[in-house]
Image (cartoon, rainbow, N blue to C red):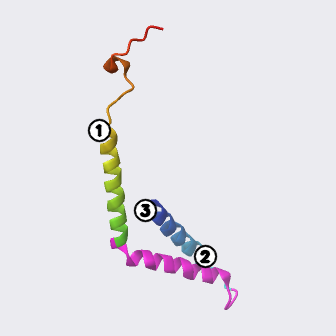
Amino acid sequence: LAAIALLVLVTSSAFLVHHADHDCAGEDCPICEQMALCAQNLMKTAAAPEAEAAVSANAYALCLALLCALMAVPATHNPVLLKVKLSN
């Protein structure tokens, strides 16, 4: 989720920078409309840094819990530890 938010920020910023000096077609300019949407995305994201921090903290906690759960599972693939005789 954090990667998607970062992708939206980067692409919106890149679009704004790339089309900053476009030839405006007037009142119904599609580029101006898209630039307004990109600016709105940036404003929404900048207005909610606490929400992004909470999402990042939850994702970090989930990854940490998953890592701990995987470390707690015993390794059952080792035939020596399982004392399996391989006499084929």
At label 1, which amino acid type do we have? Ala
Cβ atoms at labels 2 and 3 below 8 Å apart: no
Relative placement, left or right, of 34 versus 86 is right
x, y percentage for residue 17? Answer: 55, 73
Q: Earlier in the sequence, mark 1 or mark 2?
A: 2
Q: Earlier in the sequence, mark 3 or mark 1?
A: 3
- Mark carried by residue 72: 1
Q: Secondary structure at mark 3?
A: helix
Residue at 37% across, 19% down: 79
Relative placement, left or right, of 29 versus 78 is right
x, y percentage for residue 45? Answer: 43, 74
Q: Which residues are magenta?
A: 25-50
Relative placement, left or right, of 87 versus 37 is left
Q: Is residue 27 above or below residue 15?
A: below
Q: Which residue is mark 3?
A: 2
Q: For mark 1, does the 10 Å Cα neighbourhood hold few (<14), some (14 to 19), or many (20 or more) residues? A: few
Separation of disc 3 and disc 1 at Cα? 28 Å
Q: In terms of depth relative to the viewer, which is nearer, 21 or 83?
A: 83
Q: Is residue 46 above or below residue 83?
A: below
Q: Which residue is mark 2?
A: 19
Separation of disc 1 and disc 2 at Cα? 53 Å
Q: In this rendering, does residue 29 appear at all?
A: yes
Residue 83 lies in quadrant: top left
